[in-house]
Amino acid sequence: MKILIAIGGREFSKPTLDLGMKIANSFKSSTTIAYVGKKISQFSEKDVSVVHQNLDDRELYRPGIRTLEWAYDFLISKKYIEEKDSNKFNDYLLVDEENSRMKVLLKGQQSDKIDLIMRTGEIIEQLKNEVETNKHDITIIGGGGNKGIHQKLVQFIDSSVFVVKNYSVNKKYRILLPINESKGSDMAIETAINFAKSYKLDVEIVSVPEGKKSIEEVEKILLKTKDKFLKNKIKASTKLISGSAVNSIVNHAKDDSIVILGVSPKNPIMKYFFGSKPLSIAQKCNCPVLITK
Amino acid sequence: MNESYKIISSSILFWFSQKKWFVYSIIISIFLLNLTTPVGLTVPAYHSLIILLLVFMLVTFEPIPFPAIALLTLVLQVVLGVAPPNVVASSFMNDAVLFVMGSLMFAIAIVHQGLDIRLAKLIIKIFGRSKRMFLAGLMTISAVLSSFLGEHTVIAIMLPIGLSVIKNIDTQQSDGKNAVLLTLFSIAYGTIIGSIGTPSGGARNVIMINYLQEFSNVHIDYLKWMKHAYPILIIQLIVAYFVLQLTFPSSLNNIKMRGFNKNVGKTDVKKNINHLFSCLIIVGIVSSWFAFNDIYGLGIIALAGALTFMIFGMISWEEINKNTNWGVILLFAATISLGFQINETGASSWLVMKFNELLATLPSSNSMNVSWSIMAVLSGLTANFFTSSATVSLIGPMAIELHPTDISFALSSAIASGFSFLTVISSPTAMILYSTGLVSTKMFFRVGILMFCISIIILYLMSQFYWVTL
C-alpha cells in the first residue's frame, strides 16, 4: 500500500501527519509526505525559479523546505523515524524531478519508505499528478481550508481520500461505517476491516433505509456485514437509523468517530454539479472521514 | 455504470474545472461576435476589441499557457479580419519586444554571476552604522539598481541578502515577525518603486516610448524619461520608508547584518575577475542606454549585454535558455501587435470618444483632471490584476489617444502601471516575495493600498506642478 500525506501550514498539519503516519505504520506502507507550494503566475515563474536556485546556492532554505524539515523533525520526535546523527535535516539535497516535483534527499537517510517531496502549483492538479504517477492508494489531507478542495479531491483523485478533521492524538476512536448495497460500500467494508484490525478499533455499522428497501432487508445487510467483522475478531455493532441519509449519519457521528464511506456510484457529471451523499457527509461531519475508492 | 464512460467523463470534468475560464472566455467572445457592430466602429476595430477582452480574461485567469494565448491572439487577428497576415507578422517584432527578450536574458546573466555577496558587503560598508540605516540602504540600492536593470534582476540579487539577515529570526513574536516583514518589504518596495525610474526599469516603459513614437511621433529619450520619473521615485522611496516603519514597528534586535557571511564561499581570483567584468559590462550597457538609445534602441543594447556575457563564457546558452521566460516574450510580442491593431483600426479612438462622451455627462469640472485621474487609476488598478507591461501594451494606445500631444497622459499611464503594490500577481517582485511563504496576499494588499493611493497622489502632483516646468 502507498500513502500520500499532503501537508500545509506546520501546526495545522500536525494531526494530519500524525494520523497519516499511524496508518502508514500499521499497514507497513511506503509514505510520501508532500508539500504543495503556492501557485506561481506564469509571468513570474522563471523569475521565482531563478531566485529559488539562488537561495539554494546560498544555503538559504527555499520556501517549503522549512515545512518539510518541520515534518521530518515531527516524525523523529514521534519515533516514526529513528534519530541518528547521520540523518539530521541539515544536509539535504533537492532533486528536481519532472512536472514541478522536487524530492528531498537526506544524507544518511535509512528509510526508503518515507519520501519528502515538494510540488508547486494548483493543489488539486499537483496531488492528482502525484497519485497518478506514483500510484498512491490513500491520500490524506487536513480538514481545514477551502471545503471545495475536498470535493474536488474526491472527485478527481484516483485514490481513497482521508480528510483529517478535528483529530486528537489522545482520543480513543471508533469506526463508524455507513453502508448500503453499493459496490462502494463493499470497498468501505474491506478498508474498515483492515483499519479496525490494525488499530484494534471498535466498529459501528449503520444503515439508513431508503427507497423501496424494507427494514428487514436492511437489517439483513447489517448483520451480514457484522459477521464479516466478527470473523476477523473485530468488535462490531449495528444500528438502523432513520431520516435523510446525510443528516442522520452526520448527527450520529461523534467527535470520536472515524467515518469510513464508499465512493458514490453516481455519474461523475452529476456529482460535480450536484454533489453526492459521501461528499456531503465528509463536508458536514466534524471528525475524520475516509472515502474509499 | 460503464467504467470507461466514468473515466472519460471524469477526465472531461477535470479538464473543464482547470480550464473553465478558457471556456467562459470563448463563449463570451462568440456571443460578442454575434452582436451587431457598435455604431462608429468598423468590423475589424470591433473584432480587435473582442480579442482585447479575450486576452484580458485569459491572462488574468491563466487557464492556458501564455505561449498559447500569444498564438491565439495572432491567429484571431488574421482569422477575424483585424489585419492581414503580413501586417500582423510585422507588428509582432519591434524594439520593445527585443528589449523584453534582451532584458530577461541580461538579468539571468547578471544574477548568474553571484554579485549579491559583494553587494551586501558594499551596503554594509555604506549603510552599516545602524540597522535602520541598513534597511534604508537596502531599499535605496534596490531602487537605484532596479531603475536601470529592471525588477526581476534586482529582486533576485537582493532577496538572498534580505533572507540572510533575517534567517534566524523567530517569527512567532510580533517584534521578530515585523523585523522580517520590514526587511522583505523594504527590498520589494525599493525594487518596485525603482522600476519607474528609467526606460530600462521595466518593459512597460519601453513599450510606451515605442507607442508614443509610432502613434504621436513624440520621441522620449532615456534622459528625458529620467527627468520626469526620477523625482517621483525619490519622493516615493521616502514615503515608503516611513509607511513601512509605521506598519511594521520593530526593535530590529534580531537582524544580523552580517548574516550572509556564513554563506560566502571563498573568493578566488577567477571570481573576482568575473565580478569585475560583470560590473564593467553592466556599466557599459547602462551607459549605452544613456548615450546610444536613439541610434540602436534599448532592445538591441540589452541584447548586446546578454551577448557579451555569453561571448566571454560567463554564462552558457543552456543556462539562459533554461531560465528565460519565452512564454512571456511571446505574449508581450502578441499583445503589442494587438495594441498596434487597436490603434490602426481606430478602436482606440472610438473608445476614447466614448470615454469623453461619458465625461461630458458628469457635472462640470476640470475634464482634463478627471480624465487624467481615471486613466491613471485605471492603469494602476489594471496593472495590479493583469501585470504592468501587458496593461501598457493593451491600454497604452488609449492613454495616448486621450491627449496625443500631451505626453503627461502616456507617461502617467506607464508610471501608474508600475505601482504594483496591491496584488502579488502584479509584478515579478511581488510574486517572488509571496513565494517565500513569509508574506500573504492579504498582508501585501493591506500595506499596498496605502502606498498605491499615496503614489497616485504624488504622480498627480508631479504631473501638474513639476512636469509643466520641464
Image (tube, rainbow, N blue to C red):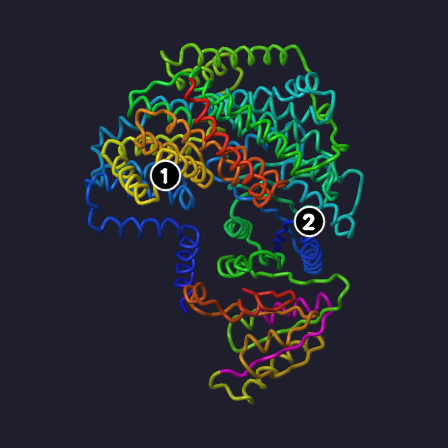
Amino acid residing under circle 1: Ser
- Tell me, yes or no, whether the two marked residues, 2 and 1, touch with CB atoms within 8 Å: no
Q: Provide the residue designation for mark 2.
A: A10
Q: How many marks?
A: 2
Query: Looking at the image, is B122 positioned above or below residue B355?
Result: above
* Residue B129, image x, y percentages: 74, 20
Q: Residue furthest front?
A: B364
Q: Which residues are magenta?
A: A188-210
Horizontal relation, residue A89 to residue B368: left or right: right
* Closest to the observer, A225 or B307: B307
- Determine crowd level at label 1: few under 14, some 14-19, many 20+ residues with C-alpha closer than 10 A: few
Quadrant in the picture for the C terminus of chain A: bottom right
Horizontal relation, residue A11 to residue A147: left or right: right
Specify the subunit that label 1 lies on: B
Residue visible at 29% across and 20% down in the picture: B217
> Which secondary structure lies at badge 2?
helix
> Which secondary structure lies at badge 1?
loop
Q: Provide the residue designation for mark 1.
A: B365
Does any portion of residue B22 appear in the rendered image? yes
Q: Are labels 2 and 1 assigned to the same chain?
A: no
* Residue B427, image x, y percentages: 50, 34
Amino acid residing under circle 2: Arg
